[in-house]
Amino acid sequence: MARLLLPTDLSDNALNAAVYGIRLMGVEQGHFTLLHTFLVPAFDPAMDLSVDMAIVDAAQEGLARFATRLRDMVHLGGAVLDHRVEHGELPNVVDRLVRELGIELVVMGTQGASGLEETLLGTNAADVIRRSKAPVLAVPAHADYRDPRRIVVADDGGTLEPSTVHPLLNIARWHRAELTIVRGVPEGVDASTLPPSPLDDLLGAVPRSMHYLSEDNLVTALNDLVDQLEADLLVLTHRHRTVWSDLFHRSTTAHMAMHTQVPMLVLEQDLRP
């Protein structure tokens, strides 16, 4: 059973992302939770309590309409679709619900047409990716769903737990996808001298190939490779300082040439000893 959390601002982008995530993971025995968060304006003694209630009622009605649109766009079969309207900042609420509901994947839509750059620059998506204990699927606004046949996986060479790779393994097996594992090579280092990828022991029989990129202009090179391979999905691992970690910092991301429309799956590696 796939347990997905689908945060939504009730926009078309969020609807597209929800449909994408459900179709990617499959509806069989799925449990999908729609989440809409709201913030009450700063307290004003003159404000009537009915104003707060009106905000909640409007949020619930909007989410109900969103759920109807979702059901019209994807056949849910016997899957469970829950509605949650919560007060608070989205990253905080997502963090709590991931723990409370045992969420396996958070699916978020992104604004604009600049792909990964917008994915990480968008305040909510960026903060959720940085803080979530569950993997996050970020879906660009105009990404049309297609079964992933080619998946590019950025490998930073760090330790990976089987549970971290589990979502990728499920997707690759379910859709019979082929993986291209990408590793960065420091200047002057022979790629053949690098230690084996930790993914080798975790991916089993999933078909895959290895690709090496110079660490000079690594982000741009990764973007070019995704386009060249016509990849359907880009996979990164979020942890502390690594060769890929600059992807998760706005100051760097603002200057990188990332314009792919490929959805991005961010795996979460727990760094606790």
Image: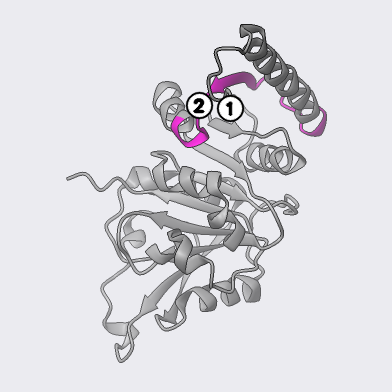
Pointer 1 with pointer 2, Cβ within 8 A = yes
Does any portion of residue 205 appear in the rendered image? no
Mark 1 burial class by Cα count in 10 Å: few <14, some 14-19, many 20+? some
- The residue identified by callout 2 is 88
Task: Determine the residue positioned at 55% across, 31% down.
Answer: 5
Question: In the rendered structure, which amino acid carries the disc numbered 2?
Answer: Gly
Badge count: 2
Question: In the rendered structure, which amino acid carries the disc numbered 1?
Answer: Thr
Task: Determine the residue positioned at 26% across, 83% down.
Answer: 193
78 is within the stretch colored magenta: yes
108 or 188, which is in the foreground? 108
Q: Position of residue 64 (x, y in %)?
A: 74, 19
188 or 61, which is in the foreground? 61
228 is within the stretch colored magenta: no
- The residue identified by callout 1 is 37
Q: Which mark is residue 218?
A: none
Task: Determine the residue positioned at 29% across, 88% down.
Answer: 189
Q: Position of residue 86 (x, y in %)?
A: 55, 21
Q: Is residue 217 above or below residue 118?
A: below
Q: Which residues are magenta?
A: 72-92
Residue 196 located left or right of residue 177: left
Q: Indicate the secondary structure of the residue bearing disc 2.
A: loop
Q: Would you identify the image quadrant in which residue 143 lies?
A: bottom right
Quick one: quadrant of the C terminus?
Answer: top left
Q: Position of residue 202 (x, y in %)?
A: 35, 54
